[in-house]
Image: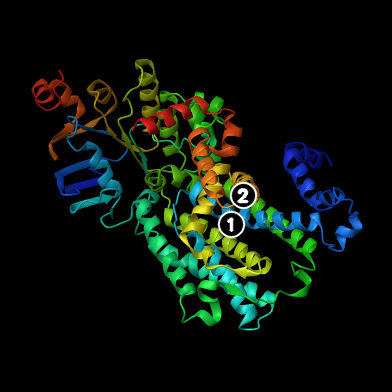
């Protein structure tokens, strides 16, 4: 009993956030007078809209989390991360739509594909380092992007239009069972986060952190660093592919943009916003990223991306450790940020 | 003579540069051997060649009867060779405890060695929960050496242990190295001849990528001409 109370005390903030997220659909409903009962049966309204936005954030958070594991924790800069996600998204759609598999079979195949793509990235892993790894992974992801855009595979992928018309099983339909979808996405994100925390705290995870800092030193201690990097890659690939599956189930269309380099940059941005290597920074970053994007688009319109870009530059200059990183260090870099800005302008 | 480590005329290239052009090092089991020589003579490269970090292109490295040529560095380390690199290469993102824990080769290594390590470096006991970033230079060096003691290493390669440390800390570190040499053979790269001459029993002098002379430290101490010629110190 005591230990339970201790667990509660230590994780008060996380548990309260979780409680808030569980209650969010009902609280959002109250603002326009919708009763919890109405929210429960998925009545149209603000609550349903907020749930939709939150689901997108959960999926983005899951994707960014998987990127933080290889980039922030293990120190591998992959520019092919969008492939990890879009393989899951496309495969889910194609298997459901064109091959008539049921959802569980689909998830099984996506799982195997996630392992296969981790192996593919793993093949180049010991041969290239640093920026070369980034470029090789970018190359592999570009091949996949070209494949999904190609007209030859258009019957399956929808080519440049995107994959649409996927029939989502009724019990998790984002239109009629949105509240259930909300809780499934929330649960998947929370479970992945807890699993990642355990992984990073484990001896294997500690070696990953050591590799990020200095791979040579880790090898000198007798570690075959490849296996650790591969373990991180594998976990990351499975998580991202599953985020892709959720994305495909939730969105009416899987856009080829999810396979583009731009979507890898999205993961990088989210992790930078939240704080590199902090894990919970990926979750906070996803929230800020999506809300910024949504808010600016809504109130400013098309020029939003310009302001968005300026905000990211300001972020990198003034809070280089991200939201969570800065919170943990308890120090802003406002003064240094101005110096950096002046330095940039002077050049 | 029983040599735990036998390096026979190795040649090592870094990029296109022919750094080691024939280095021989024989390390008697249970001894402290010092690699001496001027800056840039190839002492550190010799250590790295033994570990396979800069694999030698020619020559032979034998550790306890086993040839190391062609082995990967983490496999070489796993045979029981600990490396304490220069510049106190600890993991700053890990805590002191994690830095020690990560050096385990078998489960429970740290628990078995904890008492021994704390008796050698009592400071570490107090610092155990702190992050690597909050350690002073001397403390980092202690941690780097302590880390090499966690697994059962039969050979310790220590690169420039006294570099940049205050004299009183050097004294303490020398005591520690003497203590740990009772459990393991030590090869030491050391610029500071005073430190090396007090610690080591045998020496090898490396000059411009070649081992030029070797022998007993007690003989070298009398041989002012050799010291002056190769080390520039009296």
Left or right, residue A65 beside residue B194? right
What is the total number of numbered labels drawn onto the structure image? 2
Q: Chain of mark 2?
A: A
Identify the image quadrant of the C terminus of chain B: top left
| Marks 1 & 2, CB-CB < 8 Å contact | yes
Which residue occupies the foreground of this view, A339 or A137? A339
Which residue is denoted by mark 1 in the rendering?
A: A63
- Can residue B172 be seen in the rendering of this structure? yes
Q: Chain of mark 1?
A: A
Looking at the image, which residue sits at the far top? B168
Identify the image quadrant of the N terminus of chain B: top left
- Can residue B88 be seen in the rendering of this structure? no
Q: Is label 1 on the same chain as label 2?
A: yes
Sort mark 1 into few (<14), some (14-19) or many (20+) by Cα contacts within 10 Å. Answer: many
Which residue occupies the foreground of this view, A55 or B91? A55
Where is A127 relative to A206, above or below?
A: below
Left or right, residue B221 beside residue A225? left
Which residue is denoted by mark 2 in the rendering?
A: A286
Q: Residue at x 50, y 23 (%)?
A: B123
Q: Secondary structure at mark 2?
A: helix
Q: Secondary structure at mark 1?
A: helix
Which residue occupies the foreground of this view, A279 or B136? A279
| Residue A165 screen position, x and y as percent | 65, 77
Q: Residue at x 46, y 67 (%)?
A: A119
């Amino acid at each position: 009993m005591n230990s339970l109370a201790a667990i509660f005390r230590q994780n008060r903030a996380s548990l309260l956030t979780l409680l808030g997220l569980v209650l969010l659909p009902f609280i959002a409903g109250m603002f326009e007078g919708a009763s919890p009962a109405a929210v429960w049966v998925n009545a149209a309204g603000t609550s349903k809209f907020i749930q939709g936005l939150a689901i997108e954030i959960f999926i983005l958070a899951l994707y960014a989390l998987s990127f933080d594991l290889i980039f922030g924790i293990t120190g591998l800069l992959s520019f092919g991360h969008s492939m990890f996600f879009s393989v899951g998204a496309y495969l889910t759609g194609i298997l459901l739509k064109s091959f008539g598999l049921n959802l569980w079979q689909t998830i099984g195949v996506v799982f195997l594909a996630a392992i296969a793509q981790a192996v593919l990235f793993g093949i180049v892993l010991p041969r290239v380092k640093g920026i070369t790894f980034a470029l090789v992974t970018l190359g592999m992801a570009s091949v996949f992007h070209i494949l999904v855009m190609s007209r030859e595979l258009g019957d399956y992928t929808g080519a440049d239009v995107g994959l649409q018309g996927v029939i989502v099983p009724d019990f998790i339909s984002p239109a009629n069972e949105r509240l259930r979808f909300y809780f499934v996405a929330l649960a998947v994100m929370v479970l992945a986060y807890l699993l990642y925390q355990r992984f990073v705290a484990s001896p294997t995870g500690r070696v990953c952190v050591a590799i990020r800092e200095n791979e040579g030193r880790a090898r000198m201690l007798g570690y075959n660093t490849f296996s650790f990097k591969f373990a991180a890659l594998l976990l990351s690939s499975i998580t991202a592919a599953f985020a892709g599956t959720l994305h495909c189930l939730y969105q009416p269309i899987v856009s080829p943009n999810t396979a583009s380099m731009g979507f890898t940059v999205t993961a990088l941005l989210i992790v930078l916003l939240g704080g590199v290597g902090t894990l919970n920074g990926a979750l906070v970053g996803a929230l800020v990223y999506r809300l910024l994007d949504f808010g600016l688009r809504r109130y400013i319109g098309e020029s939003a991306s310009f302001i968005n870009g300026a905000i990211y530059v300001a972020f990198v200059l003034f809070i280089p450790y991200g939201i969570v990183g800065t919170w943990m260090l308890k120090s802003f870099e406002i003064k240094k940020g101005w110096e950096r800005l002046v330095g940039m302008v002077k050049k | 003579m029983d040599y735990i480590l036998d390096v026979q005329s190795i040649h090592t290239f870094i990029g296109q540069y022919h750094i080691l052009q024939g280095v021989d090092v024989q390390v008697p089991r249970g001894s402290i051997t010092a690699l001496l020589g001027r800056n840039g003579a190839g002492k550190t490269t010799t250590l790295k060649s033994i570990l396979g970090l800069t694999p030698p292109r020619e020559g032979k490295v034998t550790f306890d009867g086993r040839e190391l040529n062609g082995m990967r560095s983490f496999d070489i380390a796993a045979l029981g060779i600990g490396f304490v690199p220069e510049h106190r290469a600890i993991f700053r993102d890990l805590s002191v405890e994690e830095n020690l824990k990560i050096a385990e080769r078998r489960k429970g290594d740290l628990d078995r060695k904890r008492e021994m390590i704390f008796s050698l470096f009592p400071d570490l006991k107090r610092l155990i929960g702190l992050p690597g970033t909050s350690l002073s230079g001397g403390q980092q060096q202690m941690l780097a050496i302590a880390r090499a003691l966690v697994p059962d290493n039969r050979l310790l390669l220590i690169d420039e242990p006294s570099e940049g440390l205050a004299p009183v800390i050097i004294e303490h570190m020398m005591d520690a190295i003497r203590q740990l040499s009772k459990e393991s053979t030590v090869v030491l790269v050391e610029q500071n001849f005073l430190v090396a001459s007090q610690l080591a029993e045998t020496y090898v002098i490396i000059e411009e990528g070649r081992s030029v002379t070797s022998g007993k430290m007690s003989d070298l101490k009398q041989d002012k001409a050799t010291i002056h010629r190769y080390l520039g110190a009296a």
